[in-house]
Image (tube, helix red, strand yellow):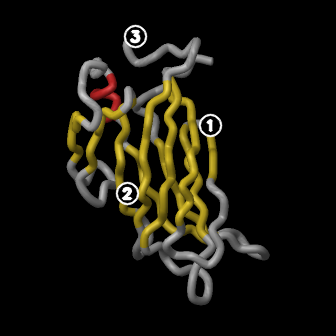
């Protein structure tokens, strides 16, 4: 495996997701990065679902697009699309390369502002806590009338991984 490391994505919840059935939806999230696809469970009848699921993908190229797509599960027809967003990990990776081991827990390392280049719905903080760097974010879904995803990312090195310092 020639991965740099693993990215753990905690899909916390959906906020005000689009209605795709009569009055609600049965949403789930698919994360797509290069040739990998992982997905959450389906949350029945809920436009504000709480998943609290951890999904992990391997990162071979920090410039590769990481797309989150939300779908409405349908039993007899093709699942309906409910929007998508991309995670921009570049600001997070830059912070990882800083060597933050001496920082006190809870230190905010950086803030990432929403822009046309990312899907952030609001300012996102990158925080050092308990020996880990995490970034909490709320992503505004594209190609849909409404909806946001709340999630957190965390980098995981693994034995045999190339790491980010090469």
* Disc 1/disc 2 C-alpha distance (Å): 22 Å
User: In the image, is residue 101 above or below residue 144?
Assistant: above
Q: Is residue 120 visible?
A: yes
Picture quadrant of residue 56: top right
> Which structural element holds mark 2?
strand
Residue 48 percent coordinates (x, y): 49, 72
- Residue for badge 2: 139
Q: Crowding at label 1, few (<14), some or many (≥20) Cα neighbours within 10 Å?
A: few
Residue found at x 34% / y 54%:
119
- Residue for badge 1: 35
User: In the image, is residue 25 above or below residue 55?
Assistant: below
Residue 137's tag is none
Residue 145 percent coordinates (x, y): 41, 76
- Residue for badge 3: 166
**Residue nearer the viewer, 84 or 154:** 154
Q: Crowding at label 3, few (<14), some or many (≥20) Cα neighbours within 10 Å?
A: few
Labels 1 and 3: the sequence-earlier one: 1
Residue 40 percent coordinates (x, y): 62, 55
Q: Is residue 149 left or right of residue 96?
A: right
* Disc 2/disc 3 C-alpha distance (Å): 30 Å
User: In the image, is residue 88 above or below residue 21?
Assistant: above
> Which structural element holds mark 1?
loop
Picture quadrant of residue 58: top right
Where, quadrant-wise, is the C terminus in this rendering? top left
Q: Is residue 91 visible?
A: no
């Amino acid at each position: 495996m020639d991965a740099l490391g693993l990215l753990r994505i905690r899909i916390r919840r959906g906020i005000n997701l689009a209605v795709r059935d009569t009055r609600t939806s049965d949403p789930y999230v698919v994360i797509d990065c290069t040739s990998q696809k992982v997905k959450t469970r389906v949350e029945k009848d809920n436009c504000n679902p709480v998943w609290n699921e951890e999904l992990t993908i391997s990162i071979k190229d920090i410039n590769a697009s990481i797309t989150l797509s939300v779908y409405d599960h349908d039993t007899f027809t093709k699942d309906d699309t409910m929007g998508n967003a991309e995670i921009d990990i570049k600001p997070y990776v830059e912070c990882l390369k800083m060597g933050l081991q001496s920082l006190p827990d809870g230190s905010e390392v950086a803030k990432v502002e929403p822009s046309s280049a990312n899907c952030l719905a609001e300012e996102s903080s990158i925080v050092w806590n308990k020996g880990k760097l995490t970034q909490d974010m709320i992503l505004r879904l594209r190609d849909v009338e409404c909806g946001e995803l709340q999630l957190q990312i965390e980098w995981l090195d693994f034995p045999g991984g190339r790491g980010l310092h090469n």
